[in-house]
Amino acid sequence: MKKKSFFEKLTGITRDDEEETEEQIENEVPESEGEEEEGQLAIDMYQTPSEIIIKTMIAGVKQEDLDISITRDMVIIKGKREETNDTVGNDYFHKELYWGAFSRTVILPQEIDVDESEAINKNGLLIIRLPKIDKNRQAKLKIKSA
């Protein structure tokens, strides 16, 4: 049995694994040209005693280019930020902003009330308020006589 190198001990990858990985990379099918990759939207998500709140920056996104779908346990945010071509050729010094399609799927830690949820765009900051379902809440049921 061959003695493992420091790198192999540290990463758990052996020479045999590396050769397999190189083979897999060579045999990968390239993405079809013209197919644009979607960016992933960065979010902040936190909770209050009664709500789950999701915040994300959507500056530069038209309202008609934004789609928010929610279920009791998941939120999907999709959109598109179109680039305005104000420059000619390669006049950029820096080009760091993301342009194009983006999406984010968030699995919620608790069930929410879909009907009472709301989304607010405040100066390019999207705030989604998702009221929690209180499973411990009790209500008195009135009995009707027939």
Image: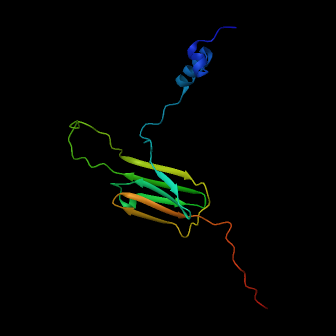
Image quarter hosting the N terminus: top right
Find the residue positioned furthest to the front.
49
Find the residue positioned furthest to the right.
146
Q: Residue at x 46, y 54 (%)?
A: 78
Reply above or below: 36 against 8.
below
Reply above or below: 72 against 2.
below
Reply above or below: 31 against 80.
above
Q: Residue at x 65, y 9 (%)?
A: 3
Q: Residue at x 49, y 50 (%)?
A: 104
Dividing the picture into quadrants, the one containing residue 114 is bottom right
Find the residue positioned furthest to the top.
2
Across and down, in percent, residue 97 comes to: 33, 43
Q: Residue at x 71, y 80 (%)?
A: 140
Across and down, in percent, residue 54 comes to: 48, 56
108 and 97: which is toward the camera? 108
Dividing the picture into quadrants, the one containing residue 133 is bottom right
Q: Is residue 6 left or right of residue 59?
A: right
Image quarter hosting the C terminus: bottom right
